[in-house]
Amino acid sequence: MDSFPIRRLSRLGNEGLLSSTLAVVELGRGRYEWGVVALLLLSRCAADWVNGEVIERPAGLRQSMSVRAISQSLAAPYASIHRYVAAMQEQGLVIATGKGVAINNHPAAAPAITAFLTGAHDRFIRLAEDLASDLDFGHPEGAPRPGLLAATMAAALDIALVPYEIAHEPITDWTSKLVWIVIIVANVRHITTDDALSRAYAIEPTPDALRMPIDVRRIAAITGLSYGSTFRHCQKLAGLDVIKYDRGGWLLASRQLRDSDVDGGVRALLAYYGKRITGLVALGLPIDRIDGAYIGHRPPYAAIGIAGS
C-alpha cells in the first residue's frame, strides 16, 4: 500500500492556494482579473522591490513586461489583458515603463504592494512549515546566504502563479477556479486543522459523510463575488462534474477524489513545491527553525466562517 500522505499534503497545499488567491483579489482592489495580472507583474519585477534582506519601495523601476508577454504567460486573450492593464493604469496600480508596464512604485501605491509581498513571503514559509512534517527538504549548512530573501520571494510568487500559469485544467476560468478552491478547502477545513483526523485521512480520501458542504451565500462572502455570480459559477462547475450539491451546499465531486490523473497532478505539484523549498534550504532557509523565517508571523488560514475555520 502506498504510504505517501497525498490527501493530507494536498489539503495543506490547497490552504496555501486559497490564502494566496484571496490575497490576489485584494491586490487587484477587488477585481480578481487585475490581481492576477498584478501578481504576474510582481513575479517578473520582484527584484525591484527586494533590497538585500528588505522588501521596500524601489526609487526606480528596472523591470517591466509587455502586454503581449502577460497575455502569453497567462494564456489569456490579448484584448482582455490589454483592457485590464488600461484600467489598472487609470487606477494607478500599474504604470508604463521601459518596453512595457510595471507595478506602480509611487509612494501612495507602494504600501499595499510591500504588504502583499510580505504576506506572500510568509504564506510561502507557512506552506514550507506545513509540508516539512511529512517531506524531507534537507538541512541548511551554515548561515543564510546573501540573496535568500530574493530567492524566497521568487519561489513564493511562482507558486502563487501556479493556478494561472501551470494548473489550467480542469478549470480554465479564473473566477470558477476561485469558487472551486473555496469549496475544496471548506469541505475539509475541520479535517485539515485536526491533527488526528488529518493523519487518519492522510492517504485515503475523506468520505463524503465527513466532508462539510458550503452554501452559495458563504462562498460569496468569502470571495467577494455577488450571490448571482457565485451561483452561476457553481452551476458551471457542477456541469463540469467537479462539484456536486449535497446537504444544502456544495462538495467536491467524489470522482475527483479517486481519479488517478488528479492524483498524478497533485503529486507533480507537491514535487514542484518540494523542489523550490529544497533549493531554498540549500541557501540557508532554516527549515528546522522555520518559525524564525517569517518576516511577520505565521499567517492564519483564510477565514471561511464554518466549523473548524
Image (cartoon, rainbow, N blue to C red):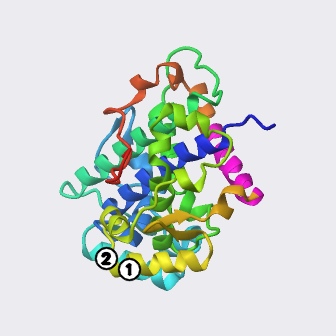
Q: Is residue 87 left or right of residue 195?
A: left
Residue 293 magenta-highlighted: no
Asked if the magenta segment contains residue 269, the reply would be yes
Disc 2: which residue:
226
Please say whether residue 98 is visible from this viewpoint: no
Q: Position of residue 97 (x, y in %)?
A: 38, 66
> Which mark is on residue 229?
1
Residue 251: tell me if it is visible: yes
Q: Which mark is residue 26?
A: none
Residue 228 left/right relative to 234? left
- Residue occupying the far right of the picture: 1
Please tell me which residue lies in front, 96 or 136: 136
Of residues 91 and 163, which is closer to you in this image? 163
- Mark 2: secondary structure: loop
Relative to 98, say whether 281 is above or below: above
Residue range of the region highlighted in magenta in the rendering: 260-275
